[in-house]
Amino acid sequence: MPLPQNPPAGDPPVAGAGLAAPPVRTAAVWAALDPVVGAGPLQVLDVGGGAGVFAVPLAQLGHTVTVVDTSADALATLRRRADLAGVGGSVHGVQGDADQLGAVRGPDGGPDGGYDLVLVHAVLEVVDDPAATLAGIAAVLRPGGRLSVTAANRAGAVLARALGGHPVEARALLGDRDPAPARSRTRPGRRRFAPDELLELVRAAGLQAGEWRGVSVVADLLESTSGADPDALRRLELELAGVSPYRDVATGLHVIATRGAEQS
Ligand SMILES: C[S@@+](CC[C@H](N)C(=O)[O-])C[C@H]1O[C@@H](n2cnc3c(N)ncnc32)[C@H](O)[C@@H]1O
C-alpha cells in the first residue's frame, strides 16, 4: 500500500509503517495496530474518534474512516485536519452517539457486511453504558473484523493521583469511588477499569479478546524537562507495554479483539 507523505505536524503517524514515529504515549497502541492496519484498504469506524488523532493517520495509510462523535467541535477539527493532511475524501465525520451506532449512517450507509476495524479509544470512560456500546460495536463489525479498545487504567490513575500529591483522591480511586464528587455534580465522573473488567466487557460483547497491553507505562510520569531521549523512551514503552508488573500501572489499557466468523 502506498504510504502517505508529509503527515501534518502533531498527528501521530503509524509506527513501523514508514512514517515518522508516533507520540511516545501511544506508541504501544500503534505498534499493536500495525499488523491490522498494514493490510487493506480497510473500512474503519472510529467511535468517539474526536478530532482524528487516530482517524487521520489511518486515512493517510489508505483506509476509509468514519468517525462517530457527539461533539460538533471535535468533528469540525477533524474535518480541518483531514483536509490539511490531504485525506478529506477518506475521512467522514458523523455526529452521533456511541450507544446508538445502529442509528448512525456514514455517507454510504456503512460498508456491506460490517466494518473491518472499529476503534473505541478513551470513550468507554464516559459513555452511559460501556456494555451496550461494545454490544453495538460488535454488531457493526464484520465477521473476523477487529476491535481496538483503549480505556483508563484504575491502577494507573491511583498511582498518578498519589504521585501528584493527592492521596485522598488516590484512595477513593483505589476503592472505585469518585475522587471528586463535588465536581461530578456538574460534570459526569469518568470511569476507570481494571484489566479483567475491560476484558470481561469485551468478551461479554461476544468478541475474542487478545492480550491486553499497558498504554503509557512511564511516559505520563515523566516531567517534560526530564531530558529523556524520545526514541529510547519509545523503545522502553514498547517493551514494558506487554509485561507485568509494568503494564499493570500504565495510564491506559489496550486490547485488540476479534469478532468470530460464526457470530450473526
Ligand atoms: C478523550 S476523547 C478521545 C478521542 C479519540 N478517540 C482519541 O483517542 O484521541 C473522547 C471523545 O469521545 C467523544 N464522546 C463522548 N461521549 C460520546 C458518546 N456517547 N458517543 C460518541 N462520542 C462520544 C467526545 O466528544 C470526545 O471526542
Image: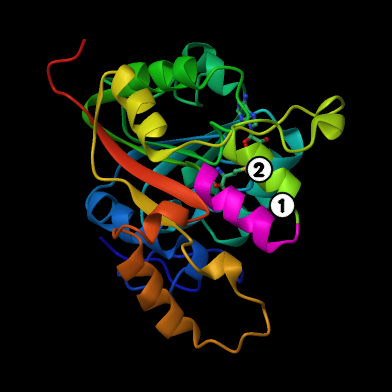
- How packed is label 2: few (under 14 Cα within 10 Å), some, or many (20 or more)? some
Residue 224 rendering spot, x and y as whole percentages: 67, 78
Which residue is rendered at x = 61% and y = 71% of the image?
9
Q: Is residue 131 left or right of residue 144?
A: right
Question: Which amino acid type is shown beneath numbered disc 2?
Answer: Arg
Comparing 235 with 12, the one in front is: 235
Q: Quadrant of the rendered structure where residue 149 is?
A: top left
User: Badge 1 is on which residue?
Assistant: 167
- Does any atom of ligand 1 lie closer than 8 Å to the CB of label 1? no
Residue 205, relative to residue 73: is it above or below? above
Which quadrant does the C terminus fall into? top left
Which residue is rendered at x = 51% and y = 26% of the image?
107
Which residue is rendered at x = 55% and y = 23% of the image?
98
Residue 201 rendering spot, x and y as whole percentages: 38, 24
Q: Quadrant of the rendered structure where residue 242 is?
A: bottom left
- Give the prevailing secondary structure in the magenta stretch: helix
Which residue is rendered at x = 66% and y = 34% of the image?
190
- Do we see residue 139 in this rendering? yes
Circles 2 and 1: CB atoms closer than 8 Å: yes
Residue 181 rendering spot, x and y as whole percentages: 80, 30
Is residue 164 in the magenta section?
yes
